Image (cartoon, rainbow, N blue to C red):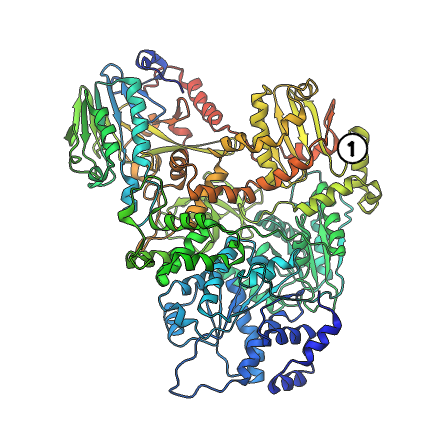
Amino acid sequence: MNFSLTRASLIAEADLVGIAGERAVCDPRGVLYFPDLRLLAVSDLHLEKGSSFARRGALIPPYDTGATLLRLQAVIADYQPAIVISLGDSFHDGGGAARMHESFRERLESLIAGRDWFWIAGNHDPDAPADLPGETVRELAIGSLLFRHEPSKVRVEGEISGHLHPCARIVQQGRSVRRRCFAADGGRMIMPAFGAYTGSLNVLDRAYAGLFRRETLMAYMLGAERTFAIAGSMLRPG
Amino acid sequence: MTEQPRLAEQNAAVVLPEPFVRWFAEKGWAPRAHQLELLARAQAGQSVLLIAPTGAGKTLAGFMPSLTEFANRPRRKPGQAHRGIHTLYISPLKALAVDIERNLGKPVEEIGLPVTIETRTGDTPSHKRHRQKLAPPDILLTTPEQLALLIAAGDARRFFEDLRYVVLDELHSLVTSKRGHLLALGLARLRNFVPGLQTIGLSATVAEPDELRRWLVSQNPPDDMAELIVVTGGAKPEISILDSEEHVPWAGHSARYATPEIYREIKRHKTTLLFVNTRSQAELLFQELWRVNEDTLPIALHHGSLDVAQRRRVEKAMGENALRAIVATSTLDLGIDWGDVDLVVHVGAPKGASRLAQRIGRANHRMDEPSKAILIPANRFEVLECRAALDANYLGAQDTPPLVDGGLDVLAQHVLGCACGAPFHADALFEEVRSAAPYASLDRPTFDRVIDFVATGGYALKNYERYARIRLNKDGMWRVSNPRVAQQYRLNVGTIIEVPALNVRYVQAGSKGSASRGGRVLGKIEEAFLETLTHGDTFMFAGKVLRFEGIRENECFVSNAPGSDAKVPYYGGGKFPLSTYLAEQVRAMLDDPQRWKKLPEQVADWLRFQADKSVLPKRDDLLIETFPRGNRHYLVAYPFEGRLAHQTLGMLLTRRLDRAGARPLGFVATDYALAIWSLADMGMMFRAKTPSLPTLFDQDMLGDDLEAWFADSWLLKRTFRNCALISGLIEKRHPGKEKSGRQVTVSTDLVYDVLRSHEPDHILLQATRADAATGLLDVSRLAEMLSRIKGRIVHKNLEQISPLAVPIMLEIGKMPVHGEADETLLMDAATLVEEAMGPGMSEA
């Protein structure tokens, strides 16, 4: 992968996905970028998940926040967005921001500086992150798009959400491939989780029942260097 | 080996209490020489290793020292304090503990000994465990995991203060796994509690008895060994290889061709035990036998995935001699008494000479009668392997695996367990740990890193001090930081990691299980296998053909599927790679046309044909054949080093061939050979020395290439998962909730990725690499092979496929193809969509 600073100008028509009339790139690193709006959306960072587990006795490596921020730094450097929206569950728990190592806090603050940064409230972090710049909102409407953490039960065209950590699975030649994915049906989209320790839930799971139009469901599965658009009919549960 | 005169001398000194003398006399038996000898050594205060074939009265011998002491001790008076545990018996199987309770109870009762015998396993109800703590039995029969739990209890030192003996059954099978490491550490702890503790190890024949002798005693002083008593003998087994009138297949593992001949043998014998290597083979053989079972003989099935109740029923029927045949996997390998088996049939190659010997030992449980066994090779290479194993069994050669150093993940678990029991001093615990044979060469810095890991995770980034599980106090002692740590430890003890598996439950055909709760549970199947199934697929399980109806939470719903065209389940468990020793024997046989005379004619013809068309490799050579076929070019290598080492070799070679521009597409590996196919002409490349074969097979592939592959190998991730669970980094179970669902837990794969990129030298990654070297990747064996074949590679560039290559070429298409092709599969799936919908904006 060799993205340069001019990545934004290299976006080919073929890479673009339509959501309620807006065009976006499903970046294989798990972020969504709207070139016309210079807007970058990222979901479910779950920063400080490691220390959240450590509090309860599972001492998993404390490097997840650093790893997640490094990846975020890379995509921000590539796209140079004017607006960044973190779609909720930015921290794994309410105390996460306060526990963050000073070096990570500085790295995060430097990413925020000079942009419009929105923290959307999630179920893990309903309140504004402690002492961090950026604006905390419950949901955010921009043009025909509506950004919120949890997908709403009542269908809203143009809704971009996270929360469910979608992944998709296909079976080809007797082998099973499972990847995180963007799930979309042309009208709404659920973004993959970005955090280094975030797991995923199959887009065919009951938790997604009623959210998508089955006949137009597409999973944009994350590959090493591109996303793969897979029709809903090819997806497998589990 | 013990010599006769000395034996007699020893026996003279043995004091056999009067009730025993009377009991033996009443039975018309005499105590066996090794039983008396073991008693004499134990009475002299020594620990003993007894190596004997099955049927030699091993169990009674192991308990003789304890039982004779009971005969001599005064009865406990009412009101007197309870005595502690006198003898601890540890076996690898819960079932074995239960079995021993039954078998030992009888002589104890007949001799009239005042002894209490109880079991304590994972199945023991909590009120009984509680009572055992207050009023311990004289003999406690238990498993390594239960011992770990007892040691981690606050009253452990007092609980074990009266302990005299630890009897370790099936020691040869215990010591080779991480359970053995945990047990060795537990024994070291017990020796600390009770300095004069004696151990008695009972084992089948092993290649290196001295390793077990060291294992049984403290390695402080170093290299101290338990006494050794070896019982040789018994009658030589009568083993034959089925010389089938049918065509022996080139490839495959079903041995279906031999079913009528096997059935004929079952009819000829009283009870036949049929061993296979995998559970899927067991299912298939069972189906095939019932297909020809015109006399409806009682033939049963037994393997580890079946529901426990079902297994117990089969075992009971077996004990009562109500069965004519039983198809089984390794679950029956160990020393359980199985009624009057008069024939063992081994379907498929035995993979190791020792394993074959142990399985054959199941027939005719009296050691003075010959066991009778028939080997059924499933394909032509297996004919060679069976012949080699058979020669080995007659020669008494042994190929049990060498013992490996104790795992650091296991040590971490033990350290936390010790802290849960009582505060410890690092210096003292280090000395204690090093007294356990698997940890005799552990160095202090590594030990300190393990303690650091247990305390705070041991990360370079010191972020978790405030969450420490154990803390160093001012008095120099490590203590658990709060009681919750001990509670969590107790839920997660042990080294057995179960592959994620789902219950298999009957439902009505077509039902997805939402309406009804469904019928009975048939057993468990690995999640990984179920993932490849789709609604309506059929497969064999529990001796039935089933239709896959769907998955709901932790259950897989199935219905009965009439007809027999089933997709046979693939099982992760139960596959052993070909042993180094047998591999060597097979290569020797290929190199010696004289020995072909013992082979079935059709197999000998195959080898002669190979000599004619290509060449047969010399004993120490590596033969490489290259040939074109269709629009592909093939490389077939014959290292005979086992499937695991071949898989690793295949991964590494395809990387190198890719770099050299050969454009490899995939490979398959069997126990005997490895086939790689490519777009470029590899034969031509090797002749032009771009690269040369010696360069391609150079040992340096175990450096950077291996390291690079480690980055994303699922084998490494699986190994890491085991280490993470055993070491307590990730919990198997958490108080109050069973974990389920992918989004709740943190995936060990993700932790692996993060840890590997941020702290590649972390102690848990060190433990993972050490495991991989001997485990799933078998790197150590590959390394030995690469060094052996240096300067001994023979290349044959052929116009077409050789006879020897046919078996592995037939596996292509049947076995999963290895390679890093996940992206290609995604590409294919995505292309289908593009074809259907057109490229560009996929606004649906």
Asked whether, in this view, residue B819 is left or right of residue B124, the answer is right
Task: Give residue B388's position: percent from left, percent from top.
Answer: 74, 48
| Residue labelled with disc 1 | B610
Q: Quadrant of the C terminus of chain A?
A: top left
Q: Nearer the viewer, residue B136 or B374?
A: B136
Q: How many residues crowd around disc 1 within 10 Å: few (fewer than 14), some, or many (20 or more)?
A: some
For residue B211, above or below residue B35: above
Residue nearer the viewer, B277 or A232:
B277
In the picture, which quadrant includes the N terminus of chain A?
top left
Q: Position of residue B367 (x, y in %)?
A: 71, 68
The amino acid type, in three-letter code, at marker 1 is Gln
- Please report the residue visible at 27 percent of the width from the left and 38 percent of the height from the top: A48
Residue A24 visible in this rendered orientation of the protein = no
Quadrant in which residue B126 is drawn = bottom left
Residue B702: % across, % down:
57, 33
Left or right: residue B712 versus residue B610 is left
Query: For the image shown, how many numbered marks are present on the structure?
Result: 1
The chain containing the residue under callout 1 comes to B
Is residue B44 visible in the rendered image? The answer is yes
Q: Is residue A83 above or below residue B433?
A: above
User: Eyeballing the image, is B796 above or below B784?
Assistant: above
Residue B274: x, y in percent? 65, 56
Residue A109: quarter of image: top left
Vertical position of residue B163 compared to residue A29: above or below: below
